[in-house]
Image (tube, rainbow, N blue to C red):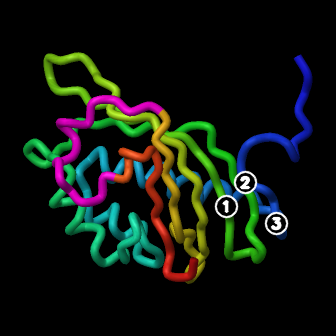
Amino acid sequence: MTRRDPVDAPGPTPRGPALDAQDVRRITALLTAYCDSVDTGDFARFARLFRDGTWLGMPGADVEDWMRENVLTYDGATHTRHRVHDISLAPGRSRDEAYGTCGIEVTQRFPGERALLVTRNTYADRFRRVDGRWRFDSRTITRRQPGDDSRHRRRGSGRDDNQKGRGTCGSSTA
């Protein structure tokens, strides 16, 4: 087995000043909050993660309504488990910008049933620090392994970017 040069490794390419350990922890917490807010059905919290950027091409102010209209809940719960893994972070051009990649696996389990794979995706993110807090600036999603999302999302949402395997979440600064 040969070792790869870190420059050839997958993930974001470092551009500027190194991220310190506190920045890495805060951005990782942001990725975890993304997963937790969907799993708990807290769409207001989910939308706040994008207040300074956009998600699926829509401004953060529109995200909560889209989630309520398109993500299925059962007595307020989605019954999903989003697991983030393989997090790789790199600095941006300034101390207030960073890039990252990660994977997220989504399963769904209802009481008395076995867990089913909803999807496995790869995310490429851009983050911005605004007023001292890290926020999502943009997100690109590539669907790696589709599963059964019939009990997670409503059909005909108008945003089913997964048919081509790739969806983007842009930023007003992109």
Label 1, label 3: how many angstroms apart (C-alpha)?
9 Å
Q: Specify the quadrant of the image occupied by residue 13.
A: bottom right
Question: Which residue was labeled with disc 2?
Answer: 12
Tell me the quarter of the picture where residue 42 sits. Answer: bottom left
Q: Name the quarter where the C terminus is drawn.
A: bottom right
Looking at the rendered image, the quarter that the N terminus falls into is top right
- In the image, taking residue 43 as reference, residue 29 lies left or right, namely right
Q: Secondary structure at mark 3?
A: loop
Q: Position of residue 165 (x, y in %)?
A: 45, 44
Which of the pair 89/45 is nearer the observer?
Answer: 89
Q: Residue at x 47, y 50 (%)?
A: 166
For residue 99, above or below residue 135 = above
Q: What's the CA distance linking mark 2 and mark 1?
A: 6 Å
Residue span colored magenta: 145-160
In the image, residue 92 sits, relative to residue 12, either above or below, namely: below
Decide: marks 2, 1 in contact (CB < 8 A)? Answer: yes
The disc label shown at residue 99, or none: 1
Q: Nearer the viewer, residue 3 or 36?
A: 3
Callout 2: 10 Å neighbours few (<14), some, many (20+)?
Answer: some
Q: Is residue 48 above or below residue 152?
A: below
Picture coordinates of residue 36, whole percent (x, y)? 37, 48
- Tag shown at residue 15: 3
Counting residues from the start of the chain, the first of labels 2 and 1 encountered is: 2
Looking at the image, do the residues carrying marks 1 and 3 touch, with CB atoms under 8 Å apart? yes
Mark 1, other Cα within 10 Å: few <14 / some 14–19 / many ≥20 = many
Point out residue 126 in the picture as x, y percentages from the top left corner: 60, 65
Where is 22 relative to 61, above or below? Answer: above
Task: Tell me the kind of residue under disc 3.
Answer: Arg
Q: Is residue 147 magenta?
A: yes
Q: CA distance from mark 3 to mark 2?
A: 9 Å
State the predominant SS element of the stretch in magenta: loop
- Kindly identify which numbered label has been placed on residue 171: none
